[in-house]
Amino acid sequence: MNKEEVFKFLDSKGIEYVRLDHEPVYSMDDLVGMEMPVTDANAKNVFVYAKKNDKYYLITVHGDKKANLKKFKKDYGIKSLNFADDEQLAEVLDVVQGSVSPLSILNDKDHKVEFYLDKYFDKEDQLIACHPNENTATIWLKVTDLMDLIRENGNEASFFSNVSLEF
C-alpha cells in the first residue's frame, strides 16, 4: 500500500485518524519547528533482521527513546540482529528508508515481521504517530486500532519495555 492506499484502507475500516501532510521527514530532528496536533505520540522505528531464523522485527519506541537492541536480543533469545538494507525494506515492507512505520507491516504478505511496540504506548486511548508508508505525511491513530490492524494482517504484535532514555 502506498500513502493514498493506506488512507483509503483506514477509511474503509472506519478507523479514525488525524492527517498532516508535510515535507519529507527522515529523523526526529526533522520535526523540530514543525507544529504537531499531538505532541506525546511521536515514535521512532528500527527495522532489523535475524538471519539465523529468517525473521524481521519492527521495533517502535517513543520519540525520546531508543531501542536497546542488546537487551532485545537477550530477552528474545536472538543471537544476531542486522539492520535491514534497502533491498529488504523494499521486498518485505514495500517502503524506502525514512518511510518505515508500523503501517508498513500491512505490506508484509508473508508475515515475516514481528512488531514490538514500546510499553509507553500501552495506555487507554493512547495515540501513536505513524507515516502512512511515505515520509511526506504523518497520521495519528489509536494504538489499539494499530495493533488490531497488524494482527489482522497475520503478524505478531506485542508491547515490550526494553528501551532506554536517549541522552
Image: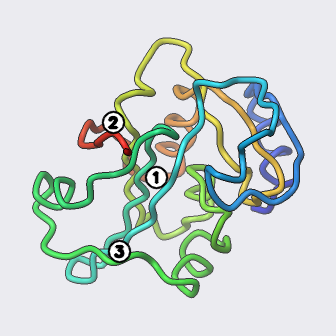
Residue 116 spot, x, y in % from top left:
37, 47
- Tell me what residue is drawn at x 59 percent, y 29 percent: 41
Q: Is residue 112 above or below residue 33?
A: below
Location of mark 2 (residue)? 159
- SS for tag 2? strand
Q: Position of residue 17 (x, y in %)?
A: 76, 28
Q: Amino acid at mark 1?
A: Gly
Residue at the spot x=78%, y=39% of the render? 33
**Mark 1 Cα within 10 Å, few/some/many (few <14, many 20+)?**
some
CB of mark 3 within 8 Å of CB of mark 2?
A: no
Q: Amino acid at mark 3?
A: Tyr
Question: For the view shown, which residue lies furthest in the bottom direction?
Answer: 87
Could you give the CA–CA distance between mark 2 and mark 1, rounded to whole angstroms? 16 Å
Q: Is residue 166 above or below residue 112?
A: above
* Tag 1 and tag 3, C-beta contact below 8 Å: no
Disc 3 designates what residue?
A: 49
Q: In which quadrant will I find the C terminus? A: top left
Q: Secondary structure at mark 3?
A: strand
Question: In which quadrant of the rendered image does the N terminus lie?
Answer: bottom right
Q: Position of residue 94 (x, y in %)?
A: 66, 72
Farthest residue to the front: give it: 167
Q: Which residue is mark 1?
A: 154
Q: Three-letter amino acid code at disc 2?
A: Phe
| 4 relative to 158 in the view: left or right | right
Which sits earlier in the primary sequence, circle 2 or circle 1? 1
Q: Foreground mark, 2 or 1? A: 2
Q: How many marks?
A: 3
